[in-house]
Amino acid sequence: MFGKVRQPPTEEQIREALKQVKFPGFSRDIVSFGIVKSITVGDEVTVALHIITRDQNIPAQVEREVAGALKAFGKVNIQMTAQQPPQQSMPMAGQGAAPVKPNIPGVKTIIAVASGKGGVGKSTVAVNLACALSQLGHKIGLLDADIYGPSVPKMMGTTGQPTITDEKLDPKENFGLKMMSMALLMDAGAPVIWRGPMIMKAIQQFSLAVNWGELDTLVVDLPPGTGDAQLSLVQTIALDGGVIVTTPQDVALEVARRGIQMFEKVNVRILGIVENMSYYVCPHCHEHDDVFGHGGGRQEAERLEVPFLGEIPLFTEIRICGDKGLPVVIAAPNSEPAKAFQKCAEAVLRQLEKR
Ligand SMILES: Nc1ncnc2c1ncn2[C@@H]1O[C@H](COP(=O)(O)OP(=O)(O)OP(=O)(O)O)[C@@H](O)[C@H]1O
Ligand SMILES: [Mg+2]
């Protein structure tokens, strides 16, 4: 006789559902991006979103995806507002003269590690590449610019707030290289609500506010994706080259292409493509298996006429070492995965020498 009365959803349920929506071009969700301004529940659900972007298609795309994610909750009002980021003193890609990028005193070369999408092992490659370059006798710094998912300190086994000398941050030193991450300055678990222009400014100031000392090469782990924030960052730091990390699947290769375009837009040289999780090596029998159809990265590099830097196997040891805070290149320098990273490091150096 009595129909089941539908309970209004809680704010938490709505927030959880919104966390399923990724910001276009990023592997992070719109909640951690700070795009969700308010959630009101009652007879009807109202969600207010505010996006700062130059891409006019993004608000509509996010709105569609939010509507999809909240379908199960009945009628939902989505209030979307969008605004362009404030004009920066430096021109955006394709506009006006090349920006003047401040050099970091004492740092000879800066390279960025990027990926078209998240989860391809960009940080793992950045960390092990930096360690391998250090083992080759170079003075190396590692800058974690992935403000949304900083994993470099964890992979490098580094914790604790950095000290300050002469009003600049002292990098952490581990395994013979220097490392700095904004994660070291933030409360663990605090949501990152920064957006494109803010991140750009923060990272630029941040990279200049570190006592790097004399470095041969600074390796920068960029946030995943090829959106406004990454493009701004690539423009902001005086980069000498970019490394693209991809996995062998077609979809990943498609996004690798976008990574290459991102660097090309701002005239940063592509040092090459690294194919990560290239093939699986069984830890027991050491047999190789091409899980994702290995070799796509090399073919793609040839097609796009950019250098191919090497293949990194999918090796359980690589993940275990990353979780332990002891990169595989350091933990087991003679192992197969370490040798793969060392080959990539040598390929990167060959490319840099061609300058
Ligand atoms: N070649 C590999 N073999 C085994 N595990 C790997 C390999 N590369 C990465 N991983 C594991 O995959 C996970 C994701 O890697 P990582 O954090 O480096 O990716 P990412 O591209 O930086 O991700 P995000 O987009 O979250 O920043 C980690 O647990 C890492 O240890
Ligand atoms: Mg990462």
Image: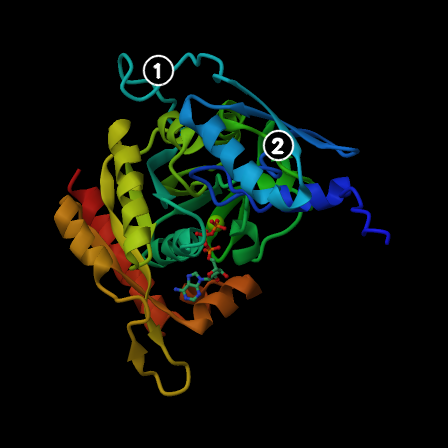
Q: How many marks?
A: 2
Q: Nearer the viewer, residue 314 or 38?
A: 38
Outermost residue, bottom direction?
285
Instruction: Estimate how packed mark 1 is, as few (under 14), some (14 to 19) or many (20 or more) residues with alpha carbons within 10 Å.
Output: some
Label 2 and label 1: CA atoms lie apart by: 25 Å
The answer to whether residue 173 is left or right of residue 79 is left
Residue 126 appearing in the image: yes
| Residue depth check, mark 2 versus mark 1: number of the one nearer the observer | 2
* Contact (Cβ within 8 Å) of mark 2 with mark 1: no
The residue at the point 54 percent across, 25 percent down is 51
Q: Inspect the image, locate mark 2, and give the three-letter code of the amino acid beneath it.
A: Gly
Q: Nearer the viewer, residue 302 or 207?
A: 302
Q: Position of residue 176 (x, y in %)?
A: 46, 54
Disc 1 element:
loop
Disc 2 element:
loop
For label 2, the residue is 34
**Quadrant where the N terminus lies?**
bottom right
The answer to whether residue 308 is left or right of residue 336 is left
The answer to whether residue 299 is left or right of residue 150 is left
Outermost residue, right direction?
1
Q: Is mark 1 within 8 Å of ligand 1?
A: no
Q: Inspect the image, locate mark 1, and give the three-letter code of the amino acid beneath it.
A: Pro
The residue at the point 51 percent across, 39 percent down is 65
The circle on residue 309 is: none
Q: Nearer the viewer, residue 248 or 274?
A: 248
**Quadrant where the C terminus lies?**
top left
User: Mark 2 or mark 1: which comes first in sequence?
Assistant: 2
For label 1, the residue is 91
Instruction: Estimate how packed mark 2 is, as few (under 14), some (14 to 19) or many (20 or more) residues with alpha carbons within 10 Å.
Output: some
Q: In the picture shown, does residue 251 fall above or below 74?
A: below
Q: Position of residue 329 (x, y in %)?
A: 40, 65
